[in-house]
Image (cartoon, rainbow, N blue to C red):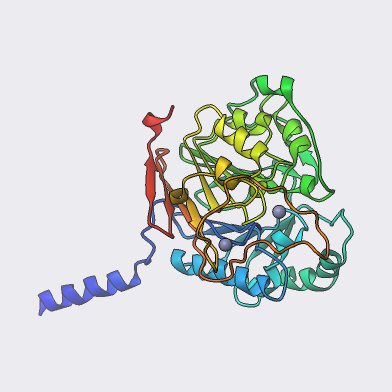
C-alpha cells in the first residue's frame, strides 16, 4: 500500500514538473525567402522573435506558418518578445497574420517609419496599434536590455543611433577602418534595431539590415561590439552591408545568412565573409543566383532548394535585375521550407544543424582558430 502511494506520488510529481528540459539557447533561422525571422528560445522557454517575414497574400501566411512551425518545434505557446527591426515589408510583413494565431506579449521597434510608403504607413496607422494595445510596446534605445530571463540581450543600435560606450571588454581600435568603403541604400535599413546577445560564454549579434555607414559608426574608430562566435542575418547577405569593418572585426567563426534565391550573397559580401579572419563556415538559407557557384558554399550548408529544383545551378553570379514590370521573378520557393537551428551551451560550445539534410556540426571553444 505504501509502495503504491509512493508510486502515485512520484507519478503526480512527474506530471506536475515542467516539460521543459532544455539547457541550451536555441536559435531558429527561419526561411522567409530573403526576409528575416529569427527565433531565440532560452532554457526556461522564454522566447524572442526578430521579425516576421514578408508581406503579401501568399507570402504573409506562408512566412507566419513557417514561424509557427519553428515555435511548435521549440514547444512554444506564445512569443514573449518581438523585435521588428525596421518598417520594410520583408521584416514586418507576416506580423498581422502571425498575431492572428499567436499571443505576442511585447512589441519592440525603433519608432516611426522614416521612409514613407503606403504599406508600412497604413500598417502603422491601422493595424499595429491594435496589435500592441493589449500587450507591451517598447521603442528601443541603444543600451536598452531586453528583459528575457537567461539571456543577456543589449540593443546596440536603433533609429540610426548607436550605443554611447563600447560593450564590456570591447573598444579596441579597428584596423579595417582605414580601408572602409561606405554606402547607404534607403532610409529605413539604417534605422534597424541591432541586438547583441551573450549566453554564458556564447556571443552572437543580429543587426537587422544596418547598412555600411551604420557599420562604420558602430565599429570605427574603435570596435564597440567586440567579437562574436556567430554572426546572424547579414542583411540577407546584401552588399550594402557586410563591410570588412563589421564582419572582420567581429571575428565570427560561423555566419548564418538569411538570403533569398535572388537576394543577397553578392560577390562583395562573399569576399568579405570568406576573407574574414577565423571564419570557418557560412550557412545559407538559400542558394542565391547573385552568388552563382563561383561564390556559394557547398550545398550541405544550404537549407533550402526550390519548388522546381534546377538540374544545375549557374556558375557565374548574375546582377540583380532592376525592379520593374518586366523583371523576371526570382526562382520560387513556397513549398516545404527548412530552418537552420543553432543550439548554444553556456560554456560557448554550439551546434548548427541544416534541417533539410540533417547535416550538423559542433563548434567547441578550444578548437577555434
Ligand atoms: Zn525558401
Ligand atoms: Zn530586409
Residue under the image location 55 percent in, 64 percent down = 306
Residue 136's image quarter? bottom right
Position above or below: 285 against 58: above
Residue under the image location 78 percent in, 35 percent down = 213
User: Could you say where residue 161 lies in the image, as x and y percent from the top left?
Assistant: 79, 40
Residue 351 in the figure: left or right of residue 58: left
User: Could you say where residue 113 lies in the image, as x and y percent from the top left?
Assistant: 84, 57
Position above or below: 199 against 10: above
Residue closer to the observer: 187 or 49: 187
Most distant residue in the right direction: 116
Q: Image quadrant for the C terminus? A: top left
Residue closer to the observer: 257 or 29: 257
Question: How many discs mark residues in the rendered view?
Answer: 0
Quadrant containing ligand 2:
bottom right
Residue 77 in the figure: left or right of residue 316: left
Q: Image quadrant for the N terminus? A: bottom left
User: Could you say where residue 105 lies in the image, as x and y percent from the top left?
Assistant: 63, 66
Position above or below: 314 against 339: above
Residue 147 in the figure: left or right of residue 327: left
Position above or below: 316 against 357: above
Most distant residue in the bottom direction: 1
Residue 357's image quarter? bottom left
Q: Is residue 256 visible?
A: yes
Q: Is residue 174 visible?
A: no
Residue closer to the observer: 265 or 100: 265
User: Could you say where residue 144 lies in the image, as x and y percent from the top left?
Assistant: 69, 45
Residue under the image location 68 percent in, 29 percent down = 245
Amino acid at each position: 500500500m505504501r509502495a503504491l502511494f509512493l508510486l502515485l506520488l512520484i507519478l503526480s510529481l512527474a506530471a506536475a514538473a515542467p516539460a521543459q528540459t532544455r539547457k541550451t539557447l536555441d536559435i531558429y533561422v527561419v526561411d522567409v525567402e530573403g526576409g528575416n525571422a529569427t527565433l531565440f528560445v532560452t532554457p526556461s522557454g522564454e522566447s524572442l522573435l526578430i521579425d516576421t517575414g514578408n508581406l503579401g497574400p501568399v507570402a504573409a501566411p506562408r512566412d507566419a506558418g513557417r514561424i509557427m512551425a519553428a515555435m511548435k518545434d521549440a514547444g512554444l505557446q506564445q512569443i514573449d518578445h518581438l523585435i521588428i527591426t525596421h518598417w520594410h515589408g520583408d521584416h514586418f510583413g507576416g506580423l498581422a497574420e502571425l498575431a492572428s494565431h499567436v499571443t505576442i506579449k511585447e512589441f519592440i521597434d525603433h519608432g516611426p517609419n522614416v521612409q514613407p510608403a503606403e504599406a508600412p504607413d497604413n500598417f502603422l496607422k491601422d493595424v499595429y496599434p491594435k496589435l500592441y494595445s493589449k500587450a507591451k510596446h517598447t521603442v528601443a534605445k541603444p543600451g536598452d536590455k531586453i528583459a528575457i530571463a537567461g539571456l543577456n540581450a543589449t540593443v546596440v543600435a536603433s533609429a540610426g543611433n548607436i550605443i554611447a560606450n563600447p560593450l564590456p571588454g570591447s573598444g579596441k581600435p579597428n584596423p579595417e577602418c582605414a580601408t572602409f568603403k561606405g554606402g547607404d541604400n534607403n532610409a529605413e535599413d539604417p534605422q534597424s534595431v541591432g541586438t547583441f546577445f551573450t549566453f554564458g560564454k556564447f556571443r552572437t549579434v543580429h543587426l537587422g539590415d544596418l547598412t555600411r555607414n551604420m557599420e562604420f559608426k558602430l565599429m570605427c574608430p574603435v570596435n564597440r561590439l567586440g567579437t562574436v562566435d556567430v554572426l546572424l542575418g547579414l542583411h540577407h547577405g546584401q552588399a550594402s552591408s557586410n563591410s570588412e569593418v563589421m564582419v572582420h572585426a567581429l571575428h565570427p567563426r560561423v555566419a548564418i545568412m538569411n538570403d533569398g534565391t535572388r537576394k543577397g550573397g553578392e560577390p562583395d559580401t562573399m569576399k568579405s565573409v570568406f576573407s574574414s579572419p577565423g571564419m570557418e563556415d557560412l550557412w545559407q538559407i538559400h542558394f542565391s543566383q547573385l552568388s552563382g557557384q563561383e561564390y556559394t558554399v557547398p550545398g550541405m550548408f544550404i537549407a533550402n532548394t526550390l519548388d522546381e529544383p534546377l538540374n544545375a545551378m549557374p556558375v557565374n553570379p548574375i546582377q540583380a535585375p532592376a525592379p520593374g514590370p518586366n523583371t523576371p521573378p526570382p526562382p520560387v520557393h513556397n513549398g516545404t521550407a527548412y530552418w537552420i537551428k543553432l543550439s548554444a551551451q553556456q560554456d560557448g560550445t554550439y551546434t548548427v544543424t541544416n534541417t533539410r539534410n540533417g547535416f550538423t556540426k559542433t563548434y567547441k571553444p578550444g578548437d577555434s582558430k
